[in-house]
Image (tube, coloured by chain):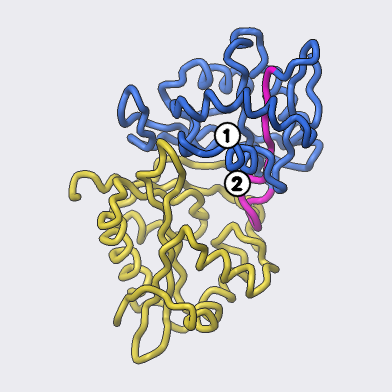
Chain colours: A blue, B yellow
Amino acid sequence: MLIRAARADDAPAIWQVIAPVIRAGETYALDRDMTEADALAYWLAPEKTTFVLESDGAILGSYYLRANAAGGGRHVANAGYITAGAASGRGIARAMCAHSLVEARAQGFRAMQFNLVVSTNGRAVALWQAMGFAIVGRLPAAFDHPALGPVDALVMYQSLGSRS
Amino acid sequence: MLIRAARADDAPAIWQVIAPVIRAGETYALDRDMTEADALAYWLAPEKTTFVLESDGAILGSYYLRANAAGGGRHVANAGYITAGAASGRGIARAMCAHSLVEARAQGFRAMQFNLVVSTNGRAVALWQAMGFAIVGRLPAAFDHPALGPVDALVMYQSLGSRS
């Protein structure tokens, strides 16, 4: 298992990983019908650092890291992670999250924030908590789940200061 | 006092209103040194609806309204308000916030969220609470205040559903 910076020629493989999650619309607040070009422009945007997790030459996951705000908020990072459906349950999200926390510290960030964790995504919530994130906010009915209807979203946060 | 949609030729007057607040860096998580062109591109971005508050032909405040997220989060609005320094204390922020809540409902939004209210901006926090927003999250040391150092930021939220 190798996590490395994404290259331009990874785009088709990244799309294979992220498309099902975007199309499902259950965990990311993105337009479910967004085009491949728009999705890749979002995932690989210039203000983001994007990584892929590779195993035996196949890309099984990808994540991005960026500043969550500018100015007085630029020391807080934000990240998004997607694991290929077929690779679920192999610790890939956990590995990417651990990598992102190291990378965020290396880039000088002093905290990391997830702005909108869908509360019904229990596996993700539990994983982020295990990785040190606390639930610091709850947004009532802030996410329209395609199957469940309006559900709460969580704001999760962790300071990176104490270990940097 | 009239609140109306901003026009392209309002840009110089809007800049006069927002520049001191951006340069101060105490309330908005924006690059304090951003250029006039970048600031106006941000404030008048195509995905935003931007308004000005006019009194006796002078623009005393401006606000923008936008979707805070896409996909399953697109029913939640976000807004930013700035009052001209010289017009402080005249209820201009309150008038703009009230207008934005009506406008948000008219645009079909079912909630409004402020992502990063600087906790030391007590007057704003109290006003948003008076306007129906609840503090739903606290982000520890998420804002580097130029004078006070790291301070907490608040996530504030209100459902618009019950009155729409």
Q: Name the subunit of mark 2.
A: B
Chain assignment, label 1: A
Residue B142's label in the rendered image is: 2
Q: Is residue A101 above or below residue A111?
A: above
- Whether callout 1 and callout 2 share a subunit is answered no
Q: CA distance from mark 1 to mark 2?
A: 10 Å
Q: Which residues are magenta?
A: A60-74
Amino acid marked by disc 2 = Ala
What's the residue at 63%, 73% (across, down)? B37
Rendering coords of residue B143 (x, y %): 61, 51
Badge 1 vs badge 2, beta-carbon distance below 8 Å: yes
State left or right for residue B98 relative to residue A67. Answer: left
Q: Quadrant of the C terminus of chain A?
A: top right
Amino acid type of the residue that numbered disc 1 sits on in the rendered structure = Tyr
A22, B101: nearer the viewer: A22
Image quadrant in which you'd find residue A2: top right
B36 w.r.t. B25: above or below: below
Q: Position of residue B115 (x, y in %)?
A: 48, 48
Helix, strand or loop at mark 1: strand
Element type at marker 2?
Answer: strand
State the residue position of label 1.
A157
The image position of residue A101, as x and y in percent, is 72, 29
